[in-house]
């Protein structure tokens, strides 16, 4: 464990062992973002959904999501994860207030709550983030799809979303006044 | 009153007489905006305060503010009033959600509430709006000043603000996490 | 119109003629409340829906709703309308913040927006309000039904709701984290 | 570390060693509550501030605050910590929505942010919670004082608050519309 206290060349990163151990002890803090395209009036026109290879080899849909690191601010974590998932030219407009549209709770046991993460108990601060630039998903995200609110609320999209995030997407659209009639 | 029911060349506008009468009957709905400059992380760096000639000839400080017209949506009213007060190239980023940071209540009698408007009982939906372009105040606004949160919270700025809007500005900064320590 | 300026024995009330005229000039400010029963953790268990006789003689479902009067505060209007629709022993717990869960816009023309009011352009500040006492609807409300979130989200309930308020109810449950999976 | 994985007689509790180690790895999730007394209209009349003996032996003022345990929901953590600090008969009214009035970030290094916790990087979901019963602080809280918003905003109260929580209290009152003029 000594290595944890020495200066860290990759601050925020934990070894797999240290991370697993930590996940068994405390809820892990995440930020989550629903990328959107808005019109001049701020009204949502499209919602960005990521197509991602899951650990089990299936393709699933997901949102921008990632841990808040030790000594990292929530705003820094939000921008870092947006850049990680949408690329450096997405130009996200981070919210003026840190108040999230919801606090999303993921439990390791499926079925106890709408959201589920087999790896851990995670609590995510969830934001709607307008992006104005070009999105170029990197890493394990294969593709970013822009869906209209109507398309995003189709049962087959919602059901495909990893960890029950269709529920979260519905909350994002309700909060934005963009829920289809 | 017949003219009110005929097609209106200036929709939303009321004659002075009709407006006075309406103001004696119902609370008048307003939108209000605190224009801000934010950094990459969405954190407020500067707050835009308008210097405006008041009806009594004094110079007072104020925020972007205006009525919601009949049959106009809140988003349309917000954009129209931002353009009226900041000019056409301000490029305001309207919020993804219509939920205001506060509901501001102005009463005609001074002293009953923090906010006061001698003309009317007004209820304003108040938003923080990042602007990325050049602001060029028109009409009766003489000047737009960009203040740091520290400068904006100086008592002499707060006390100068029309109708008690220093109180509203404090709420905007508190909500944005930009209140000075 | 002189009578409007003389001291008013029924403050807030307007004659039908004055109200009609006002409705043709400005958006009318409303408050709207979704009454709920919550458990010890604040989680919604039941949602209160009013069964009301509409002007056309049909029975429709609705929420607590009413105008904000001239010189009345939003909190006063909210409590007055809760008492009007739920009776004097409902013991509503008004929210600590006036920030509504949404701003609901009703337009007179059907189809332009999810919400519709043939009488007027209305803008409602919408709140979720826990009630702990006995509800005894008065006036034109025939009955108050307590529905679980699952029952409230049934299409036949949502479609029955006056003016498109099923949409508003969905937003209330989404904001409260009580949307069924 | 094996003990962490065996069934835990005190679920949520970590040994001091395990907790210290965890605190060096990830931000620790907290809930924080500002207890308030409200009038019939939901308006704050008094704010509850705890007088507590700090680790250095001084008396400091603080708010209701505590960790979210592993596999505990945010609502459960909020109720548990309210009961821990205010006693079993406080009858707190937990909010209908989990959206906090702010996300409070505490960093171990003083001066980098308004809030500071020498033990750890903590992120707290902060709520305003009306309490209607008798408060009987237990444990290390010596006393609960009810202050009017005016009294709570006195510099000597704000400056006495542990970790910079005077800043948080100001945000709570601003959000509730209870900031003194």
Image (cartoon, coloured by chain):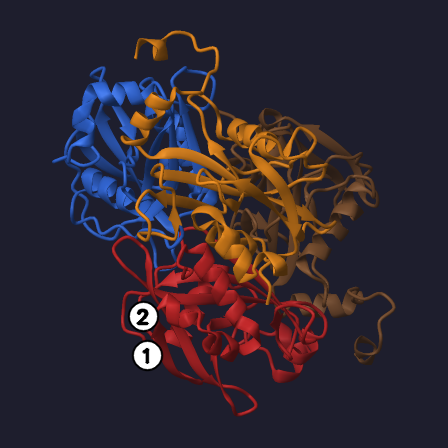
Chain colours: A orange, B brown, C red, D blue
Is A113 drawn above or below residue A63 in the view shown?
below
- C56 and A27: which one is in front? A27
Tell me the element at label 1. loop
- C35 and A14: which one is in front? A14
Mark toward the start of the polypeptide (2 vs 1): 2
Q: Position of residue B153 (x, y in %)?
A: 57, 30
Can you say which quadrant of the picture contains the C terminus of chain A? bottom right
* Snapshot quadrant of residue B69: bottom right
User: Mark 1 falls within which chain?
Assistant: C
Pick out the residue farthest to the front: A57
**Seen in the image, is D114 located left or right of residue A80?**
left
Pick out the residue farthest to the top: A6
Query: In the rendered image, is residue D4 in sight?
Result: yes
The circle on residue C136 is 1
- D19 and D33: which one is in front? D19
- The reply to whether dot 2 and dot 1 touch (C-beta < 8 Å) is yes
* Snapshot quadrant of residue A151: bottom right
Is D81 drawn above or below residue B10 in the view shown?
above
Is B32 drawn above or below residue B47 in the view shown?
below
User: Mark 2 falls within which chain?
Assistant: C
* Residue marked by disc 2: C90
Residue located at (22% from left, 42% from top) = D80
**Seen in the image, is D132 located left or right of residue C145?**
left
Q: Position of residue A115 (x, y in %)?
A: 40, 49
Query: In the rendered image, is residue A33 in sight?
Result: no
Residue located at (51% from left, 56% from top) = A158
Q: Residues within 10 Å of mark 2 (few under 14, many from 20)?
A: some
């Amino acid at each position: 464990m000594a290595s944890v206290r020495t200066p860290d060349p990759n601050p925020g990163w934990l070894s797999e062992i240290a991370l697993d151990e930590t996940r068994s002890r405390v809820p892990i803090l995440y930020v989550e973002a629903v990328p959107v395209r808005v019109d001049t009036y701020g009204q949502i026109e499209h919602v960005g959904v990521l197509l991602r290879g899951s650990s089990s080899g299936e393709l699933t849909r997901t949102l921008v999501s990632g841990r808040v690191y030790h000594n990292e601010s929530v705003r820094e974590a939000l921008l870092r994860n947006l850049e990680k998932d949408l690329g450096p030219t997405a130009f996200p407009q981070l919210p003026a207030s840190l108040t999230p549209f919801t606090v999303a709770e993921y439990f390791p046991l499926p079925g106890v709550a709408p959201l589920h993460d087999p790896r851990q108990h995670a609590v995510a601060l969830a934001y709607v983030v307008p992006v104005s630039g070009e999105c170029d998903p990197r890493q394990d995200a294969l593709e970013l799809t822009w869906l209209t609110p109507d398309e995003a609320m189709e049962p087959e999209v919602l059901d495909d979303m990893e960890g029950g995030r269709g529920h979260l997407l519905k909350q994002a659209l309700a909060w934005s006044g963009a829920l289809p009639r």
